[in-house]
Image (cartoon, rainbow, N blue to C red):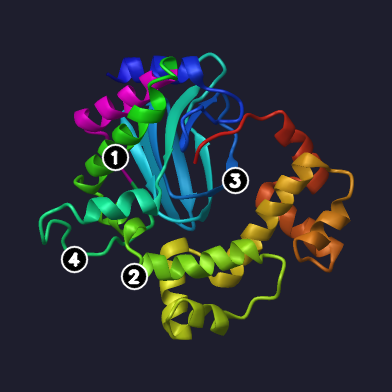
Amino acid sequence: MLTELRDLVAAHARADLRTPIPGLLLSEVGTSEPHHSLAEPLLVVMAQGGKRLLLGEQVHEYRAGQYLLVSTDLPVTGHFVGATPRTPALGLGLALRPAAIAPLLLEAPPGRWGRTPPTSPLATGDASPELLDAVVRLLRLLDHPADAPVLAPLIEREILWRLLTGPHGGLVRQIGLADSGLAHVGRAIRWIRANYAEPMRVDELAKLSGMSPSAFHRHFRAVTALSPLQFQKRIRLQEARSLLLADAGDIAGVGHLVGYDSPSQFNREYRRLFGAPPGQDAARLREAPAQLP
């Protein structure tokens, strides 16, 4: 099963990750260079190679036949282990949509999910034979585009069920629950992402999340491994990187667009995070392939 998964990913992976099936991403990366990204709720199944991911001080590693679960928008740093052009890392990503998860929560017997909340917004584990089988069947649809619109949603539903009933089902359940602690912090995360260039008032974010400021700080750091201010800074720099990738000609202007009044502060913090000045980093990025978390 893992051999077929590897072959299908290698056959269909493209530079921009996307596929004709909504929410399905494929990655082929032949470098072990560190990579900074803003991960969204996602299932990643590794078909070949491995990846080490860093969230704050937490280290998560997953290899071929294993999966990564990301439950909310998170700025992460990672690198593929031992990936080369001859033996690239191969992986599959599937977006985890609350609207697809919530209906499944209603179909399980009472008490199926338990009451212990997850302690981290990321998790890794071994992919069961049933999960791998469903993932491979989803990939096969790329060779049968006429069948994909009907069958892909059914297989996605099966994959989500396998995750919900697996060892990290509580984490996936949090994505589908509108009143979960993750969902409350998610409101603040979405506000910061949409308004990253604006001044931020933590007490207003706490109110938006339905928490006291102290509880909000505690829950926010538990989910993101960052303080709200650190998270906003990371989002600003990630957005600046995306803008520079499209046009690296006006570095000071990009810094101002993402909320920096001081060009020197922007350059200093950008270099501290990404390891190179903005212009040099953007040039390097143009040569690198897109990749999954």
Q: Secondary structure at mark 1?
A: helix
Q: Are marks 3 and 4 in contact (CB under 8 Å)?
A: no
From the image, tell me which residue sits under label 1: 157
Q: What's the distance in space between the residues labelled 2 and 3, CA to CA?
A: 30 Å
Question: Which residue type carries mark 2?
Answer: Asp
The vertical placement of 10 against 152, above or below, is above
N-term mark: 4 or 1: 4
Which residue lies under the disc numbered 4?
115
Give me the C-alpha separation between circle 1 and circle 2: 22 Å
Residue at left offset 51%, top offset 27%: 20
Identified by mark 4, the residue type is Arg
**Three-letter residue code for mark 3:** His
Q: Which numbered tag is attached to residue 36?
A: 3
Residue interval drawn in magenta: 124-142
Which one is in front in this view, the residue at disc 3 or the one at disc 4?
4
Q: Is residue 21 magenta-colored?
A: no
Cα distance in 3D space between marks 3 and 4: 33 Å
Q: Check disc 2: other Cα within 10 Å, few if <14, some if 14-19, many if 20+.
A: few
How many neighbours does mark 1 have within 10 angstroms: few (below 14), some (14-19), or many (20 or more)? Answer: some
**Which comes sooner in the sequence, label 1 or label 2?**
1
Residue 108 shows which numbered tag? none
Q: Look at the image and tell me whether residue 126 can be seen.
A: no
Q: Earlier in the sequence, mark 2 or mark 3?
A: 3
